[in-house]
Image (spheres, rainbow, N blue to C red):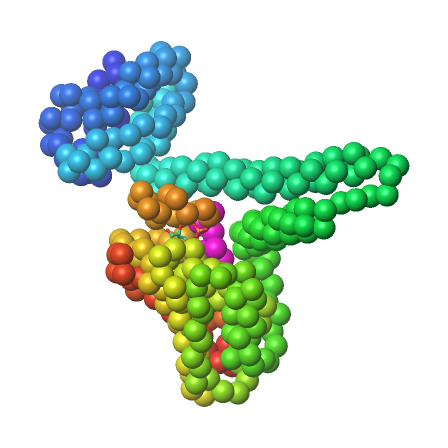
Amino acid sequence: MTDRDRNNIFVSETWLRWTGRTFNEEIKRGWFSAIYEDEREKTIERFFECFNERKNFTAEFRLMGSDGKVRWCLTEGKPYYDINGAFAGYAGSVADITELKSLEQRKDDFIKMASHELKTPITSINGYVQLLLNIYQDAEGEALQLSRNTVKSSLGTIAKQVVKLTRLISELLDLTKIESGKLDLNYTGFDLTEMVEEVVQDIRLTTSKHAIIVESNFEGMFYGDKDRLGQVLMNLINNAIKYSPEADSVEVYLEGDSKKASIQVRDHGIGIDKKDFTKIFERFYRAEGKAEQTYPGFGIGLFIASEIVHRHNGTIDVSSEKGKGSIFTVNLPRDFRQ
Ligand code: ADP
């Protein structure tokens, strides 16, 4: 709060905790003093302007904590009046929006990454289509003498890029479905071991370096959304392969009893820092680091996977050691509707 001459007359407990200063110190220096230099001048200028015109004031700025912690804050201030209606000063509130800001930043990075990831396959498809068109046009009226190999490899690349695009787009669609609460599950009974084998079989077609080893002692029927759970497994195995370029195997273990099932995917790759164990399941979160930056991705696969697992009343966890590899475990009730 300020008085009518703009002097700071009150700051709350929380503000003092954030700035690490005493009430008297803060009153003497004024509430601006803790604001990060980059935003301070502009905030003061804007506040004075609003103050002089008795307008509502809002601003975003970083606050430097005495503990070295930087907080993004959103402040809103309004003029207040005494019982006679005379202007008495400004009263404002400050909210910590650090989390929101970092989500915003992640969303921006995501949009940058998504545009890049979508553009690359399109450029490649376009290149090969042009190549095929040129060959076709050169042949003009003559009998078309296309090299079988050129056609085959061009179409092969186009097909691969289309698969990649389709996967990216369906991840984006799933994300919007989750956000609007419209991710519907298709509940059926199915053979879980068979589903795991099918997914692994599909992945084996696209990878030559890694052997995917499956061990299962699970028997009988499982109830849930077969395609969605297949998608979870596909995501975990694809990640296991992607983040272990030096390794040559990925293991999948399937266990269970009459009540539950557990699927474990193990790799021997770059691993994950402990501080990221829960974060990687959040939207747009990608572990930072020199090594991590070289892997393409959106940071939404695990978010979608964890949503699907939670919708089945299950859990998904990771344990890992940097440089040694990671283990992702999905625990599911055998029939989540019971
Ligand atoms: P992305 O598209 O970035 O791979 P995910 O949501 O699937 O998105 O994963 C989130 C982040 O978790 C990844 O960016 C990566 O940092 C980390 N991660 C996921 N799986 C693994 C793994 N098997 N090994 C190491 N890091 C992993």
Magenta stretch holds residue 66: no
Nearer the observer, 140 or 286:
140
Q: In this rendered view, identify the residue nearer to me: 283 or 151.
A: 151
Q: Which residue shows up at 15% across the image and 26% down it?
A: 26
Q: Quadrant of residue 209?
A: bottom left
Q: Is residue 271 above or below residue 137?
A: below
Q: Specify whether 178 is left or right of 141.
A: left
Image height of 39 relative to 272, above or below: above
Q: Position of residue 119 (x, y in %)?
A: 57, 38
The answer to which image quadrant residue 48 occupies is top left
Q: Residue at x 27, y 61 (%)?
A: 324
Does residue 40 sit above or below 271 in this rendering? above
Quarter holding the N terminus is top left
> In terms of image quadrants, where is residue 244?
bottom left
Residue 138: image x %, image y %?
Answer: 78, 34
Q: How many marks?
A: 0
Between 321 and 189, which is closer to the camera in this rendering? 321
Q: Position of residue 262 (x, y in %)?
A: 41, 76
Identify the residue shown where x is 37% and y is 37%: 101
The verdict on residue 299 being magenta is yes
Residue beneath the point at 34% across and 66% down? 327
Residue 8 position in % (x across, y down): 21, 22
Q: Main secondary structure of the magenta part?
A: helix
Part of the protein shown in magenta: 298-305
Splitting the image into four quadrants, where does ligand 1 fall?
Answer: bottom left
Q: Residue furthest right?
A: 141
Q: Inspect this view and state whether residue 310 appears.
A: no
Pick whichever, 204 or 83, lies toward us: 204
Regarding residue 134, the answer to whether it shows in the image is yes
